[in-house]
Amino acid sequence: MHGRSLPPAGRDLSDEFAEALARWEWDVALLQEVPPWWPAAFERRLGATAAVVLTSRNFGLALRRAVAVRRPDLIKSNGGGASAVLVRGQAISERRIERLAILPERRWLLGVRLGRGAGPWVGNLHANGRPVPAAGRELRRAAAAIGRWAGPDAPIVLGGDFNLVVPSLAGYVVAAGHHVDHILVRGFEVASRPSVLDRGPLSDHAPVCVGLTPAATPAHGRGRRSVQAP
């Protein structure tokens, strides 16, 4: 919700969002509708590496930011938007983006390859909610794009705000979900029970967390924990 809370706090909440991310256990966090200047700050505070794509309402971003920092509940989504992937404990070896839609809102897939060599891919998207068929089309376009980047063998995590309550994607398994926020996987198994994390008043979406392990490896140990955050 572009860094805001319910009920409105009337002030910048970057510290509160960073503190929430700091207290959760995760290796990869997927963020949507965040102020574009937040991921760089989260890198420093959380010891993470960030990949970012600007989404919509970012023309004249310096002016938008000046208002959003002071009066976020006044400017709301017009403060500018971005999607981000935060990674801790390993490198991002490749970053790619794919435009999924121009109207009614610009939507992008942000993809990163983890580790060195032929590591797994993680994709983050925020699909349009209107018109209703748009979300399904954008999800399929995202799957096609990350499938090209990953090739036929690399494991894939595809998560975000799908604006679909029951997503369906050929070749993928739903690893976790809550309302319209989901984590779909190819080549991974669920290693720990999915959970919905307590975010208090932050955001209008609840963060979803799940532990994953490569499908070819016995499902034990820590594996990789992915958070679809607010």
Image (cartoon, rainbow, N blue to C red):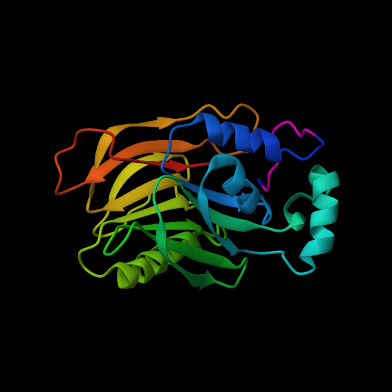
Quadrant of the rendering where the N terminus is positioned: top right
Looking at this view, is 186 or 150 the one in front? 150
Looking at this view, is 214 or 161 the one in front? 214
Which x, y percent locates residue 114? 36, 57
| Side (left or right) of 30 relative to 71 | left
Residue depicted at 44% across the width and 45% down the height? 88
The residue stretch that appears in magenta: 2-9
Is residue 68 visible in the rendered image? The answer is yes
Total labels drawn: 0
Is residue 166 visible in the rendered image? The answer is no
Q: Is residue 152 above or below residue 176?
A: below
Quadrant of the rendering where the C terminus is positioned: top right
| Side (left or right) of 67 relative to 25 | right
User: Mostly what secondary structure, the magenta segment?
Assistant: loop
| Side (left or right) of 104 relative to 91 | right
Which x, y percent locates residue 196? 45, 31
Q: Is residue 208 above or below residue 99?
A: above
Residue depicted at 76% across the width and 57% down the height? 78
Which x, y percent locates residue 62? 80, 63
| Side (left or right) of 222 relative to 38 | left
Residue depicted at 54% across the width and 33% down the height? 22
Which x, y percent locates residue 157? 34, 53
The part of the image, by quadrant, that contains residue 212 is top left
* Residue 208 falls inside the magenta stretch: no
Residue depicted at 84% across the width and 61% down the height? 63
